[in-house]
Image: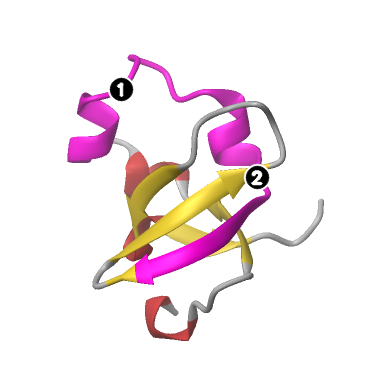
Amino acid sequence: MADAWKKGALVRVNAAAWSGSLEARASAPEAPAYLLEGPAEILAINGDHALLRYRRPVPDVWLRLDQLEGWSGS
């Protein structure tokens, strides 16, 4: 599904794909809840990465497209 991502899509981070990744190792030992709950909006896509913005006062973050899944609103 990574090929289908477009700017403006709502996503969340797939916990299994994120766990053990370089991004996870560079972060806190436990992922913040908002990261896995979503939604985050894709602001930009550059290669295999997407710039995500959350509806919270947290910084935007670049993550790999293969770590994302669609947000269903539940």
Residue 32 position (above or below residue 13): above
Residue 60 position (above or below residue 34): below
Kindly state the secondary structure of the residue where label 1 is placed: loop
Residue 13 inside the magenta-drawn segment: no
Kindly state the secondary structure of the residue where label 2 is placed: loop
For the residues labelled 2 and 1, the Cα–Cα distance comes to 17 Å
In this view, the residue farthest toward the top is 29
Q: Quadrant of the N terminus?
A: bottom left
Residue 17 position (above or below residue 23): below
Q: Residue at x 39, y 84 (%)?
A: 3
Name the spot of residue 62 as percent of width and height, x first: 36, 49
Task: Between residue 35 and residue 58, name the one nearer to us.
Answer: 58
Boundaries of the magenta span? 21-45
Residue 50 position (above or below residue 58): below
* Tags 2 and 1 touching, CB below 8 Å: no
Q: Quadrant of residue 36?
A: top right
Mark 2 sits on what residue? 38
Task: Between residue 8 and residue 5, name the one nearer to us.
Answer: 8
Name the spot of residue 34 as percent of width and height, x first: 62, 32
Q: Is residue 12 left or right of residue 66?
A: right
In this view, the residue farthest toward the bottom is 4
Q: Is residue 8 left or right of residue 20?
A: right
Which amino acid lies under the numbered mark 2 shown in the image of this protein? Answer: Gly
Mark 1 sits on what residue? 27
Which amino acid lies under the numbered mark 1 shown in the image of this protein? Answer: Ser
Q: Quadrant of residue 72?
A: bottom right
Name the spot of residue 40 as percent of width and height, x first: 62, 50
